[in-house]
Amino acid sequence: MHGPSETAAGTLPRVGSAGERLLQEACGTQERANRFYGQQMSDQLNDQMQEFIGRMEMAFIATADEHGECDASFRAGPPGFMQVLGPGTLAWPEYRGNGVMASAGNMTENPHVGILFVDFITDLIGLHVNGSAELVAPGDFAGRYPVDVIDFVPGRRPERWIVVTVEEAYIHCSKHIPRLAPVDRRRDWGTDDPRKKGGDYFGVAAARR
């Protein structure tokens, strides 16, 4: 929903991309869209949003490189792994992975990032957070944000932090969100064991032998 803002006394801030606005006009949904922008769009995380993020165990991350080539990824951790550092800032730790660094690499070319949180268990609701991302070294992060950060993965340390300056925050409606039931399972947070990470589940490596 990113787009330029134009504010004037008594008028709705201009939000939404040019593509959104053109399609709204073509489909006759301007009034509905403006109502959503006016009632549900925020440029910061209010108290309810901060509490919601604080209890989330997963998030879906969307990035794109400088050419607009997109990537969607997934992050998870114990509740609180997404740190709300204030109404306009959130951050999460990045640990050692497969070495590709698709999301972080995109952010170095194009800082725009979209984050989707979904509560599949209790409230069946989602929260979109869009903003500008920055890669921050652990030492710099600790110096810049002197907060009590939980040691999320015992024995592991982040390779970097992703710090996001919030530009948009808005609801994702509950209409089609399925209810899921958590089950007990052992989670090997931060493991480097290929088998525990899924191995060659889709058979790509086997097909190339």
Image (tube, rainbow, N blue to C red):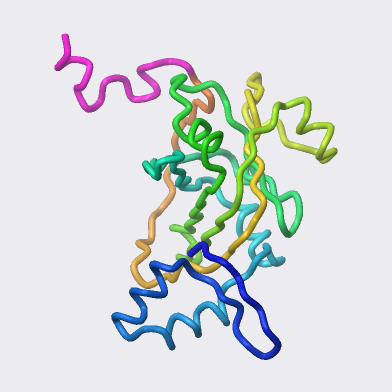
- Snapshot quadrant of residue 184: top left
Q: Position of residue 116 (x, y in %)?
A: 49, 54
- Number of labelled discs? 0
Is the C terminus in the top left, top right, bottom left or bottom right quadrant? top left
User: In the rendered view, would you say 181 is above or below 99?
Assistant: below
Q: Judge by depth and name the residue closer to the eye, 112 or 207.
A: 112
Residue 174 figure quarter? bottom left
Q: Specify whether 93 is left or right of 110.
A: right
Residue at image point 53% right, 33% down: 104
The residue segment tinted magenta is: 192-209
In this view, the residue in front, 18 or 126, is: 18
The extreme bottom residue here reads 10
Query: Is residue 86 toward the left or the right of residue 33 in the image?
Result: right
Q: Which image quarter: residue 137?
A: top right
Q: Position of residue 123 (x, y in %)?
A: 50, 66
* Foreground of the two, 62 or 120: 62
Q: Residue furthest top?
A: 209
Residue at 66% x, 67% y is 48
Q: Is residue 36 left or right of residue 156?
A: left
Q: Residue at x 34, y 68 (%)?
A: 176
Say whether residue 208 is magenta.
Answer: yes
User: Magenta stretch mostly in which secondary structure?
Assistant: loop
Where is residue 75? Give x, y as percent.
Answer: 50, 39
Residue at 62% x, 75% y: name it. 6
Give residue 9's position: percent from left, percent from top.
70, 88
Instruction: Tell whether position 85 is magenta.
Output: no
